[in-house]
Amino acid sequence: MQPFRSVTGAAAPLPAANIDTDVIMPKQFLKGVDRSGLDRGVFYDLRFDAAGGLRPDFVLNQTPWRNAAFLVVGPNFGCGSSREHAVWGLAQLGVRALIGTSFGGIFFDNCARNGLLAVELPPEAHALLLEAASDPARLRMTIDLQSQTIASGGLLTGFEIEPSRRQALLDGLDAVGATLARGGEIRAFEARHLRAAPWLMVPGSEGNRR
């Protein structure tokens, strides 16, 4: 995964409540066996008309927000089904962080596992950032995960994040990577445990223990 430390970019407003994962990534884009092309599927029915043309009234099709790095979203964003494709597609589209008041639980976990920062803020702080994102003159923000702050013009907003989730994002590690990073500790524990309980040793496996 790409580490997230300090990222600066445009923020786009998507204030509607209860945008579910079927809206974020419609089911027709779940057919592939790999993750390629999911960026086109993101918000497909909002971004494109029946003929495949861009809908000019959708915010991500408008010039100031076309390549937004952040989305300031409405409450309960990512609710609905557990499809991880929604997060994969957002990341492929270039979205690095979501700023909201609440997220669907499984979606929130999928974001952390795939390097997409999801920030939960109190309504008052969220409203100020949503206002800034809606203004082409103020839409650029910097999210610094080291200091856990969002800077927008003269506004500086702090946010909370679970420490292990923060560290995984800073290091660019998914669950497998985080486990492998502690390989030495795991092997040391295995060796201690097998010395204390040698009857657990599989015959012939002694040579694999180092």
Image: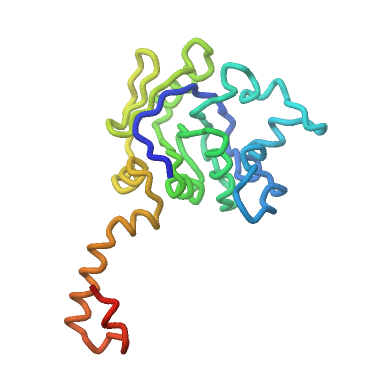
Q: Quadrant of the N terminus?
A: top left
Query: Which is nearer the eye, 92 or 49?
Result: 92
Residue 113, image x, y percentages: 44, 49
Q: Quadrant of the C terminus?
A: bottom left
Classify residue 122 as left or right of residue 187: right
Residue 90, image x, y percentages: 55, 38
Classify residue 127 as left or right of residue 154: right
Q: Residue furthest front?
A: 207
Q: Residue at x 27, y 80 (%)?
A: 207
Q: Residue at x 33, y 34 (%)?
A: 145
Residue 34, image x, y percentages: 61, 53
Classify residue 171 as left or right of residue 137: left
- Which quadrant of the figure has residue 66? top right
Residue 138, image x, y percentages: 47, 13
Q: Residue at x 52, y 13 (%)?
A: 135
Q: Residue at x 58, y 39 (%)?
A: 18
- Which quadrant of the figure has residue 64? top right
Query: Which is nearer the eye, 177 or 111?
Result: 177
Classify residue 133 as left or right of residue 34: left
